[in-house]
Amino acid sequence: MLVYWEIFMAFFIPGILGYGGGPASIPLVENEVVVRYGWMSVQEFSEVLAVANSLPGPIATKMAGYIGYEVGGVFGAVIGVFATVAPSLIIMIALLGVLYKFKDSPKVKRLTLFVRPVIAILLGLMAWRFFFESYEGIGLVHTAIIAIASFLLIERIKIHPAFVILGAFIYGGILL
């Protein structure tokens, strides 16, 4: 029974603190899943993140469902998904009237401007850690090939990231 509470807390806390949606809560989920509870390694988490990114729909709920299932079965998946959406649901219901009343306030607009750089820094730190985990796991040559090829395919040729992730999976499956 304790594992279900841990699953709930592992996704509820990032749901509360992850202002900006699923991508903003990814570093927080990683901290809970990898550091706090030790359910996955950084490498496993990055693979779950890659798969969740390639599938349609909100990334946070896909990750919560998968990780919840891995840790606590079907009930764990249900708890993980509910814990991910519960903070948003509660806050939306509680603050809808207040936000509507102050939607044009300059202070509210300024707050949004201050929060965005923090989210960018958190995502950058997570990407930096993923790079070094990849470097230690598969080596510099393979990491560089995947990183450069991914950048060129996404930014220059404009291939959808899902296909780039699939290609990286195939590359890793064949050569690694």
Image: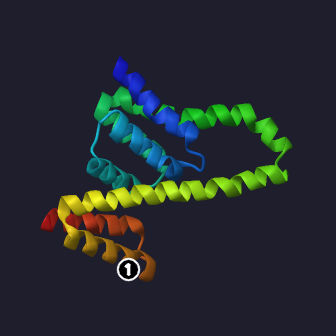
Coordinates of residue 93 in the picture (x, y in percent): 70, 33
Depth order, front residue of 137/158: 137
Q: Residue at x 34, y 30 (%)?
A: 74
Residue 79 makes an appearance in the image:
no
Viewport quadrant of the N terminus: top left
Viewport quadrant of the C terminus: bottom left
Coordinates of residue 105 in the picture (x, y in percent): 85, 50
Quadrant housing residue 63:
top left
Up/down of 174 relative to 77, above or below: below
Q: Is residue 23 left or right of residue 169?
A: right
Mark 1, residue position? 152
Depth order, front residue of 36/90: 36
Q: Residue at x 38, y 60 (%)?
A: 128
Coordinates of residue 173 in the picture (x, y in percent): 17, 62
Up/down of 113 relative to 64, above or below: below
Colour scheme used in the picture?
A: rainbow
Helix or strand or loop: what does disc 1 sit on? helix
Q: Which residue occupies the extreme left position in the image? A: 175
Amino acid tagged 1: Leu
Quadrant housing residue 165:
bottom left
Q: Residue at x 60, y 46 (%)?
A: 19
Q: Is residue 133 left or right of residue 24?
A: left
